[in-house]
Amino acid sequence: MIISRGLSAIGVLSLPTLMRLIQVLISLVTPSSVEYPKQAEIKHGQTFDFIIVGAGSAGCVLANRLTEVSDWKVLLIEAGGDPPITSNTFSILFIFQLPALFSLVDYSSSDWNYYTENDGYTSQAHRTKNVHLTRGKMLGGSSGANYMIYVRGSREDYDDWANQGNEGWNWDNVLHYFKKSERMIDPIILNGETAQNHNTNGYLGVTRPDWKEKTEPLYEAFKENGHRILSDIHGEQQVGYYYPTFTIDNHIRQSTANAFLSPIRDRPNLFVLKNTLARKVIFDGKKAIGVEVLLPGGKVSEVFANKEVILSAGTINSPQLLMLSGIGPAAHLEENNIDVLIDSPNVGENLQDHACVLLIVAGKRNIVSAVQNLAGFVHLDSFPSPVVAGHVALDRKQTYPDYQAVLFVEPAASLTASIICATVVGLEYSICNEISYAIQDRESLIVAMTLLKPDSKGKIELKNKDPLEKVKIYSGFYSNKNDLEQHARSVEDFSTIVNTTYFKSVGSELVNVNLEACKNFTYGTHDYWKCYALNMVSTLWHPVGTCAMGPEGVGVVDERLRVRGVTGLRVSDASIMPAITRGNTNAPTIMIAEKTADMIKLDHGISIEV
Ligand SMILES: Cc1cc2nc3c(=O)[nH]c(=O)nc-3n(C[C@H](O)[C@H](O)[C@H](O)COP(=O)(O)OP(=O)(O)OC[C@H]3O[C@@H](n4cnc5c(N)ncnc54)[C@H](O)[C@@H]3O)c2cc1C
Ligand SMILES: *[C@@H]1O[C@H](CO)[C@@H](O)[C@H](O)[C@H]1NC(C)=O
Ligand SMILES: *[C@@H]1O[C@H](CO)[C@@H](O)[C@H](O)[C@H]1NC(C)=O
């Protein structure tokens, strides 16, 4: 053994502090390389054509596209400030070669730091007995905090949206907007058979690191296990293990602030208010005419829109803002002493998220890399560590996946797994200690096992009518028991990988974290994995659906994303998804905003490119 069990335990305990320290150090030593719009100087009562609330994945795209119309004045309001350097510059990761720095935004002041409610049922192996739900609070929103995997979801996801009565949202419709935003840089994809599904002149840079040498044996193992291997997941075939693409360009994160806002920061018709909280929408009767804001100095002010107000505050905050403005379930609003403008029972309901369970596969013994890593306390591999991803159907004939497996390939004694365990997810230290002990001299795979199509639903509720108060978030994970069955089956399906030729040849095994809560179950059985998933479950940070579009009587917004019951108000962000997509949600949210911009232009008589 390289280090004693006791020492690794101390290491694990100090990780959260170490990560905070690194956050501070990095922000002190690194100059910012990206420039953002300056703070607008506005007057109380000033009028714009459009007001967009929230400069996240959706809001920055909308601000860009709407200011293409030069005689439209657009105000973008964001609660956070410029992105911190820890969000941005990947070159520092290559200089310091530190692992897992992608997690440096979590828990910082650029994170809303939401936690789900403890339901006494799920996530009980977390130190807080609930889930930390990072949401970016900065220009770029959660696209400044995310893990940058570029995935669109399945054809069936969007065809289902359309079939539920949302005209204009089927796969063929939305593919146009996925392509519109994209600037694909990878030469293999651009010369491959999926090239027609990509575009090279959008704002959002998408690249793919070449990890083939390191990851090839893993793809071979998945192939042996009966899986299809796809060069690119964005073709006609959407089930298989694939070489993932990332929203990274030239080592710079392609947050929507970097990709969509920075290039147009000097447009004279763009006005950006940072560190400014929208408190509620102002109505004249049932017409939205403006927004009440809390300015950085602490003053409450009003700004007006003579065309439309658009909420892009994300899945947690958009329904909160609607409710604070009198649009929501009447009884719930009355409980909170809010005057009911529109009784809209589904505001805050229909919350869907991707439940994620962490698995560690310990692999080949590698004393050399273990010693190197421990001596320098750093990765000798460059970050990001190689990533392998799969969209897997339990029934191999199905055309859409049931689960996603994302594998991070780590050298021996890597700290990444412990950081994810102790800091990002916040599991019990005893679990993280088991993990760090198991991989101290072995290479490993950190596996994020995600249930892609849950039936469970959660919800958002107000605590009270104070706009500064955080809402209550009920994740609803596994509230439908079938989801727990499916997730356990997914883990079992994945775990058969240890019996493939390659995995056997390096003596791989799943790390048994000795979960106290599951000690009455035989390790590795279906009931054990159910218990494991139930206690370990975390989020892949993909909450959607709380202001879902849908037909009259169901949808909070209609298929043009207009809030039902009022005029002059739309919602455009991840909250409008009627059902979660089978994949990561950033690219779909950007697509939603691209499409919204065209719908707004058409509705105001501006022609669009098709
Ligand atoms: C840690 C993490 C990892 C992820 N990894 C991936 C990944 O690898 N790939 C992927 O595709 N997706 C990933 N996601 C998910 C993806 O980033 C989100 O689905 C997407 O960013 C949501 O976009 P949005 O526009 O709906 O909300 P956001 O991007 O969260 O934007 C909302 C914005 O509104 C602002 N705001 C909120 N309320 C107010 C108010 N009252 N006044 C003013 N401003 C307000 C917020 O500060 C924020 O900037 C990840 C997310 C996280 C957090
Ligand atoms: C691996 O194969 C052995 C022998 O067939 C079997 O007992 C075991 O359950 C398999 N392991 C997994 C995780 O599938
Ligand atoms: C395990 O089983 C024992 C004996 O039936 C019981 O007392 C204990 O509460 C169980 N532990 C857990 C974590 O369920």
Image (spheres, rainbow, N blue to C red):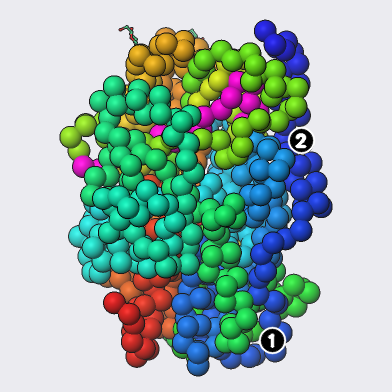
Q: Is residue 405 visible?
A: yes
Q: Which residues are magenta?
A: 399-416
Residue 73 within the magenta-colored segment of the rendering: no
Residue at position x 27%, y 59% from top?
A: 196
Q: Residue furthest top?
A: 1
Q: Position of residue 100 (x, y in %)?
A: 63, 38
Mark 2 beta carbon near ligand 1 (under 8 Å)? no
Residue 513: image tag: none
Q: Dot 2: what SS?
A: helix
Q: Nearer the viewer, residue 130 or 29?
A: 29
Question: In terms of sequence position, does the residue under pointer 1 or pointer 2 come before the other?
Answer: 2
Residue at position x 52%, y 76% from top?
A: 63
Q: Nearer the viewer, residue 584 or 294?
A: 584
Density class for disc 1 (Cα within 10 Å; few <14, some 14-19, many ≥20) is few
Number of numbered labels in the structure image: 2
Q: Amino acid at mark 1?
A: Ile
Q: Amino acid at mark 2?
A: Leu
Residue at position x 59%, y 52% from top?
A: 251
Q: Quadrant of the C terminus?
A: bottom left
User: Mark 1 = which residue?
Assistant: 42
Judge left or right: residue 195 versus residue 120: left
Q: Position of residue 235 (x, y in %)?
A: 27, 50
Q: Residue furthest left?
A: 397
Above or below, 65 relative to 119: below
Q: Position of residue 452 (x, y in %)?
A: 36, 42
Q: Quadrant of the N terminus?
A: top right
Residue at position x 64%, y 62% from top?
A: 138
User: Mark 2 = which residue?
Assistant: 18
